[in-house]
Amino acid sequence: MVKSNYPSIDVAPRVLLGPGPSLVDPRVLKAMATPLIGHLDPQFLDLMNKMQEMLRRVMQTDNQLTFAVAGTGSASMEASFANMLEPDDSILICINGYFGHRMVDMAERYGAKIHTISRPWGQVFTAEEVESALKANPAKVVAIVHAETSTGAMQPLDEIAKVVHAHDAYLIVDAVTSLGGVPVRVDEVGIDVCYSGAQKALSCPPGISPITFSDRAVEHIKSRKTKVANWYLDATMLGNYWGSERSYHHTAPISMNYALYETLRVILEEGLEARWQRHRETAALLWDGLEALDMSLHVEADYRLPTLTTVRIPSSIDEAVIRQALLHDYNIEIGGGLGELKGRVWRIGLMGYGSRKENVVLLLAAIERLMK
Amino acid sequence: MVKSNYPSIDVAPRVLLGPGPSLVDPRVLKAMATPLIGHLDPQFLDLMNKMQEMLRRVMQTDNQLTFAVAGTGSASMEASFANMLEPDDSILICINGYFGHRMVDMAERYGAKIHTISRPWGQVFTAEEVESALKANPAKVVAIVHAETSTGAMQPLDEIAKVVHAHDAYLIVDAVTSLGGVPVRVDEVGIDVCYSGAQKALSCPPGISPITFSDRAVEHIKSRKTKVANWYLDATMLGNYWGSERSYHHTAPISMNYALYETLRVILEEGLEARWQRHRETAALLWDGLEALDMSLHVEADYRLPTLTTVRIPSSIDEAVIRQALLHDYNIEIGGGLGELKGRVWRIGLMGYGSRKENVVLLLAAIERLMK
C-alpha cells in the first residue's frame, strides 16, 4: 500500500475581489475549526434556532420556513424551482444574464412550461414588461434575479412583485449577490421564495445557502399533487428538520453551520444599514477610480450593484493577461466576463468582509500599473 | 436596527460515538480554517486534481468520474439515482434498513418503476435472492446498501455484483458508513456507482460526499434520452467541472474541500490496510465489552460492521434516559435506534478518528456506571 505523498494545503493568500467566493472574516474561519457536535445534539439544535432567527433578520422576513440549504447557492436556486413547480406548471422567467438562463435549465428539468422575456445583459426589467408577458401567457410562478452576478445589474422588485401578485402568481427572487450587501426586503416587497448564496456579500464560505418561503408559498407547496421531484431539496422535509419536529432528513453540515452562524453574528453586529452604507461607499470609490482610469462601467448608475461591478475592457488591452498578472503578481483575484460578456468586461466584487477601501485602492493601483 | 445579542459558539466537547458525524482529526479542523481562494484559482484546481487522485485510492477505483459532491451523503445518494434513472426505468432496491427505504423514496421521485426485496433489519441479502428478484422482474439498476447505518449490518457484495452484471444491470452501492473504515473495493467488486458520506469513517465534517461512476455507468448516462432531472447533481456537468474542461457549474465549497483534502491525506498516511485493521480491533474490543455487560449484539458476527455497532437494549433499562445521561454527564454521544429499531437498539459508531481504544474503554465504563 503506497502511503500519501500529497503536500499539506499551502496556498498563497488571495485578495478575493471577483464574483465569489469573497474574503471571509477570520472570526468565521475560526468558528469553522470548532470541534464538531452531533446534528441532533441539543447544543446544535439551539444553534439552528438562533441561526433561523438571525437569517430572518438579515432577509427581513417573518417567514417561518427560513433555513439554510446544505449546498451552494445553486442548490437553493434549484430548491426554489423543485418545490414551487409541478410538471406542466407555467413559469415566466426573466432573463438578463447568465443566471436567468440557468433558471430555465432548472425549470425545464422539473417539467415546467416555460415562457421567457429577455433584456440585454446589464439592463433590468420594468413592471410593464412583466405585466404584458403575464397577460400574453399566464403563469403560476415568475422568477427573476435581483442581483445578476454575470452583469452587475440590480433589478428593482417592488412594482414587479405587485404585478406578479395581481396575476395571482408566485415570485421567486435570486438574491445570491445582493443579500448582506444591499437591502433584500423579502416581506416588504412581497417575495414568495428568496434564496441566496453564502460566498458573496454574506462573506461566508460557499457550501450553505439561505432560503425563505412565504406562508403563501408554503400553502402552495402543501397543495401539490405530486411529490417534490427532488428528495434532498424537499422544502417540507427540510422544514420538518429545521422546525420543532426535528424529523431526521440529512446530516446538517455542522462546520458550515458554525460558519454561517458566526457570519450572521458579524453582520448583525455591524448592523444592516451600516453594512449597506459601507457597500455603497466602497463601490462608489471603485467606480470613480475606474472612470479615472478611463474605463467605462457596463451598467448605468441607477441600476448598478454595489456588490459587483462590471467594467468594460478597453480595446487596447488583453484582459486575460492583466487578470492573470493581478493574480500572479499581486495575489488579487477579479473575475472575467461570463457568457455573452466573456472577454468584454471584468467582474469586480466588493462583498462583505472584502468591501473595504484598502482593497479598492490596492486594486486600482495594481490595475493602473499593469495597464501602463 | 437592533444589533446582535447572539452568543459566540461555545459548545461542550463531545466524544462522538454515534452514527455520525464522527470525531474529526484536529488537522482537518485546522485545514478548514485556511483562508479561502477562488474556485477557479490554479491553486484550487490543483487541489481538486489531487483530491480526485486520493479519492480514487481510497475508493479503490480507476474510474475517471470520481469526485466530491457539494452536499451531504444524501446528496450523493440522490445523485446516483438522478443520473442512472430515467422515467419508467425499472430498478430493484434491496431493503434491509432505513436507507433502503430512503432509496425507494428517491427513486420514486425520478419516475422509476420500483421493485423491492426485503430482509429483516440487521440481516443481509444473498446473491440468490437478488437473482430470483431479477428473474421475476428484470431491472436496469439494482441498488443496495453496503453498510446500513440503521442496523450495523455489512452486506457482502461480490456475488451480488456478478448476478447484477449477468442480468445486464447497473449496481449502485451505498458505502456511506463503510468507506474509510472497511474495504470498499469498487473496481474489484464491479460497482457501477458508489457513493459515501464524509462524516462517518472518513472522519471529515459533513457537507461533502465522494461518488464514483464506472465507465460503463458513464456510457449509460451519456445514452440517456432525457436530461438528468436534477441540475445540481447532474454528473455530466459535475464531471466537466472536475475534469479538464473546468466548465463552471456551482462554486465549489472551498473550505469543505480543504477539509476533505486533509482527510484523505490523513487516511493515506495511515494506510488503508492499517486503518481497516484498527477499525476491526477497536470494534472487537467494544463487542467483547458489551457482551461482558450482558448485552447482546443485534447483528450476527459474520455480517457485523466494525464502524457501527447495534446493541440490543436490555428490557430493564430506559434507553433514552441512559443515552441522555451519557451526553449530559460524560459528553459522550451515541445513537438511538432508527425506524423499526427505535427504542430497541443503541447505535455506537467507532469511525475514523473516533475509532480508538480509549473511546471504547470510556464508553463501556460510563455505560456500566449508568446501568448500575
Image: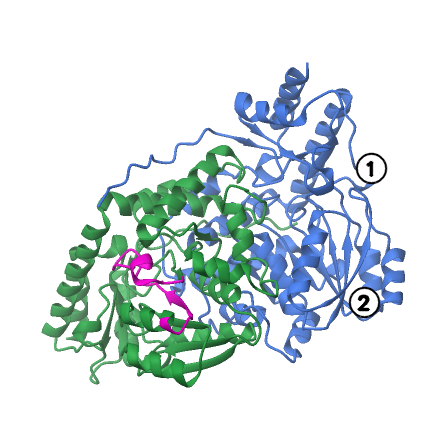
Chain colours: A blue, B green
Task: Name the residue tied to disc 2.
Answer: A165
The residue under label 1 is A300
The chain that hosts pointer 2 is A
Residue B183 lies within the magenta run: yes
Relative to B219, residue B32 above or below? above
Does residue B347 sit above or below A286 in this rendering?
Answer: below
Is B356 positioned to the left or the right of B22 in the image? left
Q: Quadrant of the C terminus of chain B?
A: bottom left
Task: Kindly state the secondary structure of the residue where label 2 is placed.
Answer: helix
The number of numbered discs placed on residues in the rendered structure image is 2
Farthest residue, direction top: A372
Q: Is residue B319 magenta?
A: no
Amino acid at the residue labelled 1:
Glu
Q: Nearer the viewer, residue B186 or A291?
A: B186
Kindly identify the residue that appears in the image at 26 percent across and 80 percent down.
B318
The disc placed on residue B306 is none
Instruction: Where is residue B350? Give x, y as percent.
Output: 24, 61
Q: Position of residue B221 (x, y in %)?
A: 52, 61
Instruction: Magenta stretch: give its range.
Output: B166-192
Question: Is B246 above or below relative to B127?
Answer: above
B92 relative position to B295: left or right: right
Residue type pointed to by label 2: His
